[in-house]
Each structure stands twice: as C-alpha cells, then as structure tokens.
C-alpha cells in the first residue's frame, strides 16, 4: 500500500511528480504538502487522518488508526519542490527502454529481463544511463563479457539519460488513477510540451 503512486501538484495545481504513498505521507506530516480530494478540497495531516475510511478507500494503519491513502497531494511550500532528476535505478532503466530488449527488440516480461552493461564492467564500462540497457536473458548470455561489437550485436538505439519530463509523462500514462485526471487535462499537457521545446 505504501508503494501506491501519488500525484504531486505544485501550488498552481500542475503535476510535478509522481511519488510513493510513503513519501506523500512524510510530506503531509511535515506540512510540506496537503491532500487534495476528488472535490478539490485540501486537508492537512490531522484533518485527513480524522476522515472515516470507507470500503472503497485504500488505507493504511498509521498511529493506531486507519488512514486513507491519498491519490493527489499539493505542495504548499516554495522550497520543497522535488529535484527534477530521474533516479538511476532498475525500474527507470526498464521504463526508458519500454521493457524491451535493446539487442533483439523483443518485449518481455520482467522475469526475463536483465540489465546489461554495454561496455562490460570488466572492460571499464560505467554504471550510467549511457552504458546500461535493458536486455533479455538470452541476449545477455549470448553477449557475455564482450562489447556489442565483439559479440557482433547491435543496440536498437543509443542509450541516454531520460529527461525528467519524459519520465513524468510515462509515469502519468502508465499508472493513472481516476483522481488524477482533472490535473492531467489537455491544458496541462500543453504546458508540458511547451517546456520540452525550451
Ligand atoms: Zn534480446
């Protein structure tokens, strides 16, 4: 439950991030953010905790009572906007590569995918956005400790660090709760594409 995704809005009600429920609770508890409900009312930690939990709500036991998991929160302070950096982790690499092996181009379930160092670590390859790709186990095995050239294998595309906006858009399109929709309107989407052109 603490891993469910929560949409984070800035003070102008524009989406700026997708975070975990755990992080959202920390922000609400610290007074950095407030919960926004489906009627656009805002709640601080106490007023949110005082709401009754009904059957349809995802909830969690905190401080000896059940509290609803928020779907949308709004940042209420100026200095706490999350850093616009995409974390270098397994999930974000798989997401960047669309859960597709970058050698054979096949889309595979997570259990059949692996991370591959394009230039192997044993040859001085770094663990970086530009040198780590999603690969299927089969291609990974075939490539072994060689470079793509040595293994006569070709990357589908050059790996790069994803932009923060691309990753946010991906997160918002993959997991989208009904409660997020008012904030993902075409107007807001236009706002995001404007930023991309900068
Ligand atoms: Zn493959």
Image (cartoon, rainbow, N blue to C red):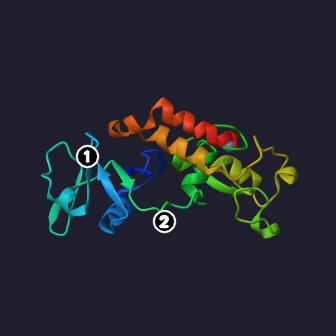
- Which residue is denoted by mark 2 in the rendering? 79
Q: Residue at x 61, y 60 (%)?
A: 88
Residue 149, image x, y percentages:
87, 51
Q: Residue furthest top?
A: 186
Residue 107 in view (yes/no): no
7 displayed left or right of 152: left
Residue 142 in view (yes/no): yes
Q: Quadrant of ligand 1?
A: top right
Crowding near pointer 1: few (<14 within 10 Å), some, many (20+)?
Answer: few
Q: Residue at x 81, y 43 (%)?
A: 154
52 displayed left or right of 48: left
Q: CA distance from mark 1 to mark 2?
A: 23 Å
Residue 52, image x, y percentages:
12, 52
Dot 1 or dot 2, earlier in sequence: 1
- Which residue is denoted by mark 1 in the rendering? 41
Q: Residue at x 50, y 32 (%)?
A: 187
Residue 100, image x, y percentages:
63, 41
SS at mark 1?
Answer: loop
């Amino acid at each position: 439950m603490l891993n469910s995704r929560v949409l984070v809005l800035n003070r102008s009600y524009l989406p700026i991030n997708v975070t975990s429920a755990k992080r959202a609770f920390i922000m609400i508890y610290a007074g950095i953010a407030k919960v926004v409900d489906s009627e656009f009312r805002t709640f601080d930690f106490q007023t949110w905790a005082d709401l009754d939990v009904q059957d349809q709500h995802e909830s969690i036991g905190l401080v000896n009572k059940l509290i609803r998991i928020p779907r949308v929160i709004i940042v209420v302070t100026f200095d706490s906007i999350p850093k616009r950096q995409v974390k270098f982790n397994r999930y974000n690499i798989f997401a960047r590569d669309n859960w597709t092996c970058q050698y054979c181009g096949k889309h595979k379930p997570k259990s059949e995918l692996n991370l591959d160092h394009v230039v192997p670590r044993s040859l001085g390859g770094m663990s970086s956005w530009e040198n780590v790709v999603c690969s299927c186990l089969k291609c990974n095995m075939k490539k072994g400790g060689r470079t793509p050239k040595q293994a006569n294998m070709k990357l589908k595309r050059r790996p790069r660090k994803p932009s923060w906006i691309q990753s946010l858009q991906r997160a918002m399109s993959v997991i989208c709760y009904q409660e997020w929709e008012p904030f993902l309107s075409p107007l807001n989407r236009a706002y995001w594409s404007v930023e991309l052109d900068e």
